[in-house]
Amino acid sequence: MILDLQRFLETARPVWTALEKDLDYLENDPDPAWDLARTEQFYRLYQQTSAHLAEVRHLTAERELRGYLEQLVARSYARIYVRGKEKSRGRWWQWFTAAFPAAVRRHAMAGVLSVGLFLVGCLFGAVALRIDPTAKGALLPFGHGQQTPTERVKKEMEDQGKKISQARGRFSADLMTHNTRVAFFTLGLGMTWGLGTIVMLFYNGVILGAVALDYIVDGQLVFLMGWILPHGSVEIPAILLAGQAGLVLGHALIGWGNRLPRRLRLRAVLPDMVTMAGGVAVLLVWAGIVESFFSQYHEPVVPHALKIAFGVVQLGALTLFLWRGGANESAL
């Protein structure tokens, strides 16, 4: 609520002036050469102006001011969500390498929370299994609780010769479908004000933590790393990114620290959520291919050291991509 209109105008007018100047520049240049920093600044000006519009809506005597702000917000929205889409048609590579990592970075705090919830789940799963080894059947998935890691490793080594002759394409497609379903379910649970997403991130962490401790205690750490890292170095981050998008959705629904109406809050985050969901799907397609055609083969067919090195390098490349991807590209 605005108590001092004059002070409000003095504080907010520089934001409107800067936004209007940027809009004039963009509308006069059909292909502006903007870097990521200037694009993000433009987006922040748009968000601030949208918030100012929400604050002046109740001022019935300021009809002219409301009209001016509505025009600014509408022009900005068209530049960000309409013009941007028109430019990206047929340019999916630029979308993936620039728009996707930029969207991830814009919601960095949600990403940190997603990783934190997952790691807390990992710790809980490991501690729970350490305290009560008889809980393996409840904590470990996919029949892991019915075998020791050594028994499972022996079976994997015996079966890999048969796997070479199997239809790898169908197995890869099944993995992609399953992982994408889990990721989108985690994202969609953001509709529960983020609570469902939090549970899914924690639960997935519990499973990984319990499995990791079980293999470590049984002396099979090297095998586990060689088995999981090649595809897990992409698959697990993809699930965490889906959780990040789910937390963004939950925050938009709750509206902490944001005085915009819920409809506008959701509309503001929707483009980034769609971009992140698409990026997650691409990552999971790659993870499914790697898991089917590489992760499932063990020594002596493929050395554990090679698989571990592949996973570590891949994780480093993905981290660098999300951190710096598209930093020098134009986004508008």
Image: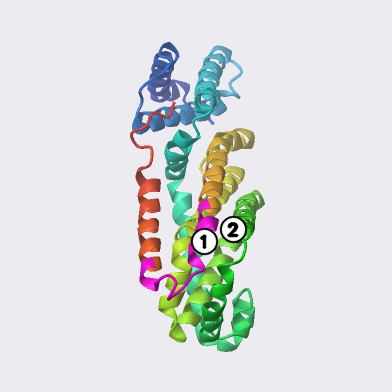
Q: Looking at the image, do the residues carrying marks 1 and 2 touch, with CB atoms under 8 Å apart? A: yes
Point out the image quarter for the N terminus: top right
Q: Is residue 161 magenta?
A: no
Instruction: Name the magenta segment's main secondary structure.
Output: helix
View extreme (front): residue = 165
Q: Residue 227 versus residue 206: which sits nearer the camera?
A: 227
Which color scheme does this rendered protein use?
Answer: rainbow
The tag earlier along the polypeptide, 1 or 2, is 2
- The residue shown at (40%, 33%) is 40
- List x then y, in percent, for residue 48: 46, 30
- The residue shown at (38%, 37%) is 326
- List x then y, in percent, for residue 247: 55, 51
What residue range appears in magenta?
Answer: 286-306
Q: Residue 78 versus residue 288: which sits nearer the camera?
A: 288
Can residue 224 be seen?
Answer: yes
What amino acid does circle 2 point to? Ser
Q: Which residue is mark 2?
A: 172
Q: Is residue 287 magenta?
A: yes
Tell me the crowding category of disc 1: few under 14, some 14 to 19, or many 20 or more residues within 10 angstroms, Cα based. some
What amino acid does circle 1 point to? Phe
